[in-house]
Amino acid sequence: IKYAEAKQAQLETNLFEVESSVKTEETSEGQKLIVDFLRKCKNIQESVASDDEMMAEINKLKQEVLRQDSKYVKSLLTN
């Protein structure tokens, strides 16, 4: 029961952080990062020959997005 209560408190805290992030300028910046990432992924898909090469390029893009340290992106990844 104590574990469940602690987990509930953690989830509620995470939800509060997501809601707080959604209400700020960080949201639009984070959404721009995601849209840019998706556009680049589409370009990669159209320009590479193999699935392995495509996944390698997508992983590079993912790391670029994560380096931006966006709270919005982080909130998407934790849920």
Image (cartoon, grey):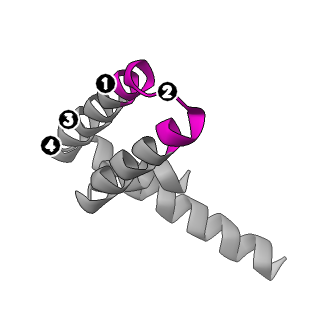
Would residue 61 be found to the left or right of residue 8 on screen?
left
What amino acid is labelled 4 in the image?
A: Glu
Front residue of 4/38: it is 38
Would residue 1 be found to the left or right of residue 18 on screen?
right
What amino acid is labelled 2 in the image?
A: Ala
Q: Which residue is mark 3?
A: 28
**Of the numbered discs in the image, which one, if any, rests on residue 49?**
2
**Of the numbered discs in the image, which one, if any, rests on residue 58?**
none
Proximity of marks 1 and 3: CB atoms separated by less than 8 Å? no
Q: Height in image: 29 above or below 11?
A: above
Would residue 68 be found to the left or right of residue 51 on screen?
left
Q: In terms of secondary structure, where does tag 3 sit?
A: helix
**Of the numbered discs in the image, which one, if any, rests on residue 25?**
4
Q: Earlier in the sequence, mark 2 or mark 4?
A: 4
Query: To which quarter of the image does residue 23 belong?
Result: top left
The residue range painted magenta reads 41-55
Say which residue appears at 43% left-offset and 42% top-offset: 58
Say which residue appears at 49% left-offset and 52% top-offset: 77
